Image: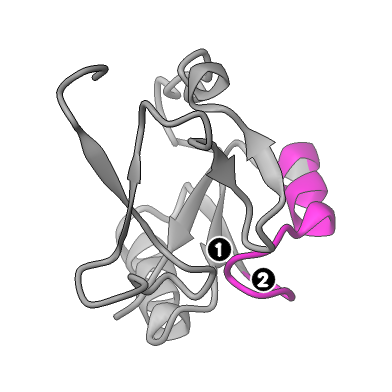
Amino acid sequence: MSGNNSKITVLDPGGQPSGIFGRRLNVDSPMFAIHDPVYQPRDTAEALGAMKMAPRLDSLEGKTVYLVNTGFAGGKEFMEEVQDWFTRNRPSIKTELRHKKTSMFTDDPELWAEIKANGDGVVFGVGG
């Protein structure tokens, strides 16, 4: 992306673009970094390139899937509908519905530890 004036939109901690079209940040700028919701540097763009998603499960049969409402408007109702669908259509898949105790933009270490210890997969839901 260097040299072509590429820019990305940066959202504020509430998830809303700051300004009419969002604040813009030149990715070639030395100030480019990914920030957590309280504006603390968390990682650089280079380090994020090395991150990988978890491997896909071969099947969900007999597994436990956590359904996490992150707190967006409508998220609770949406995740309840997802859980109802699994109950009706895929009863061999156990679902655990959880609601983040913290803001949608903050960490929830206790919840992540529970999911890691007891879950096989997770769906993070948002509403809208």
SS of the residue at dot 1? strand
The range drawn in magenta is 99-117
Q: Residue 6 vs residue 63: left or right?
A: left
Colour scheme shown: one colour
Q: Few, some or many C-alpha atoms within 10 Å of disc 1 (few <14, some 14-19, many ≥20)?
A: many
Q: Determine the residue positioned at 44% across, 36% down.
A: 60
Specify the amino acid type for callout 1.
Answer: Val
Q: Percent position (x, y) of residue 14?
A: 49, 75
Residue 37 has which mark? none
Specify the amino acid type for callout 2.
Answer: Lys
The answer to which image quadrant residue 34 occupies is top right
Q: Residue 90 vs residue 53: left or right?
A: left
Q: Percent position (x, y) of residue 82?
A: 37, 67
Q: How far apart are marks 1 and 2 (CA)?
A: 7 Å
Q: Earlier in the sequence, mark 1 or mark 2?
A: 1
Q: Nearer the viewer, residue 73 or 119?
A: 73
SS of the residue at dot 2? loop
Q: Few, some or many C-alpha atoms within 10 Å of disc 2 (few <14, some 14-19, many ≥20)?
A: some
Q: Determine the residue positioned at 22% across, 77% down.
A: 20
Q: Determine the residue positioned at 36% across, 32% down.
A: 27
Q: How many marks?
A: 2
Looking at the figure, which quarter contains the C terminus? bottom left
Q: Determine the residue positioned at 32% across, 67% down.
A: 85
Query: Up-down: is 106 above or below 62?
Result: below
Whether label 1 touches label 2, CB < 8 Å = yes
Q: Residue 32 vs residue 16: left or right?
A: right
Instruction: Please name the residue that numbered disc 2 is placed on.
Output: 100
Kindly give the residue lying farthest to the top in the view shown. Answer: 50
The answer to which image quadrant residue 68 occupies is bottom right
Q: Percent position (x, y) of residue 122?
A: 53, 47
Instruction: Please name the residue that numbered disc 1 is placed on.
Output: 68
Q: Percent position (x, y) of residue 28?
A: 37, 26
